[in-house]
Amino acid sequence: MLFPPKWLIFPQTSVHSTMNKLRYLIAVSSVALLLAACDDTPEYRPARNFDGDAKAVAGMFLTAEDSTEITLPEGHFLFDRSLILEGRKHVTVRGAGTKRTVISFKGQAEGAEGILVKNCKHITLEGFSIEDAAGDNIKVTDTEKITFRNIESGWTGPVGPENGAYGLYPVLCKGVLIEGCTVYGASDAGIYVGQSDSVVVRQNKAFHNVAGIESENSTRVRIHNNEAYENTGGLLIFDLPGLTMSGGDVEVWDNNIVNNNLDNFAPAGNIVGMVPAGTGIMILATRGVRIHHNNIDDHKTIGTAIVSYELVEALSAESEAAEATVGSTAEINASYRSDTAYNAYPGRIVIEDNHYRKIRGLPDMNHDIGKLLVMKFPLNRPQIVWDGIRHPDYYLPDGSVNPDYRICIREKLLFVDLDLGNDMENLTKRPDELRCKN
């Protein structure tokens, strides 16, 4: 018997009680678990001289007109406030190359973003490095046709929660292309696409972020031929409550998602703080996702996780007393309870023809899911895990699975249904219900 009897300590049956039982088990267990020593914190300290004429560059942004090019010269430029493009059409911002044109916002005194683009059409940003914004290095909002090309975005020094949230951050956009970029050091996501339509993310590198690449509440998203490594989580596909649109129609292929085992350094209360170190891909409450022909290797906790928002709320319940700041888990949980249109359950998921390599050792023991995996699968941990928390309409009247919540796995490896919504009573390895039928 893994847990104490329900009638003794835990009379209720829910995902919340399951997590509470897990914490109880870990607290009273006499089994000694030897935790692996943490790696040194990654850091980046490039040489910078900041001899460029920042005032002249700021003037280019201020005076830019439609159908023009802002040519950023070679040099290192230091700014104390955001560079803004607003209400412009057909503008290109082009540097001399990522190692030759460097714009920095270290010590920024005004504004949260490095570069802010809003209410624009047909904007291209390419060929420069951007560093150390107080918030997001580049934020683009309410814009149609935005291209990020050959940009390097990051934070210097050791990674930590004081770093900005997003490296490249298009939100509420239509027609997004992110290609050939390198992102590092973000305390949320290196490449993040939120509430956007028609998105392509290809041929990028993301490392030393909490999340390498994240698609959130976005639709018609294509993510391929990227490298995501040495992040906490390689790729996140999230749908969260309280936002303007739901996501779906997301395809992920030919990516190299490896060794994403970095300790989670998200600020306290941040939603990505619930991602265990050692996660390759996490699909949260999104329907219409296909994951295929990716290399998903060397993750100490989970290769691919499929979870509902019910689990997120349960895992974060102990932080409910924290201040509900914008974007915090507490605020999102409040939206979850009030957003009657939100669907918390994943479905129409296809995972097939990927390459996984099993690794040995302990998962993230700072996370309840890592502890659960050790207890339930001490010798042979699964590479694909579904929390098993089912929508009330998961089964049709005839007993078959509702196609809207179908999960199809076509892989020759261990995958499991944890059945967390039912105290793991029907935890199943390689369940036939999750096997692709055609």
Image (cartoon, rainbow, N blue to C red):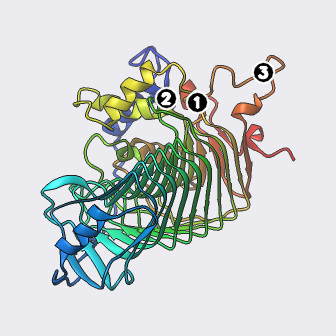
- Image vertical order of residue 257 relative to residue 387, above or below: below
> Could you say where residue 89 lies in the image, as x and y percent from the top left?
46, 58
In the picture, measured across the screen, residue 188 lies left or right of residue 358, that is left
> Could you say where residue 433 lies in the image, as x and y percent from the top left?
76, 37
- C-alpha span from label 3 to label 1: 16 Å
Q: Which quadrant would residue 303 be assigned to in this image? A: bottom right
Is there a contact, CB below 8 Å, between mark 2 and mark 1?
yes
Count residues near mark 2 (Cα–Cα under 10 Å), then give few for <14, some for 14-19, many for 20+.
Answer: many
> Could you say where residue 263 lies in the image, as x and y percent from the top left?
33, 59
Q: How many marks?
A: 3
Mark 3: secondary structure: loop
Mark 2: secondary structure: helix
Q: Which residue is mark 2?
A: 310
**Mark 1 is on which residue type?**
Ile
Towards the viewer: 312 or 125: 125
- C-alpha span from label 2 to label 1: 8 Å
Query: Which mark is first along the chain, 2 or 3?
Result: 2
Q: Which residue is mark 3?
A: 396
Q: Which residue is mark 1?
A: 389
Towards the viewer: 170 or 216: 170
**Mark 3 is on which residue type?**
Leu
Depth check, mark 3 against mark 1: the one in front is 3
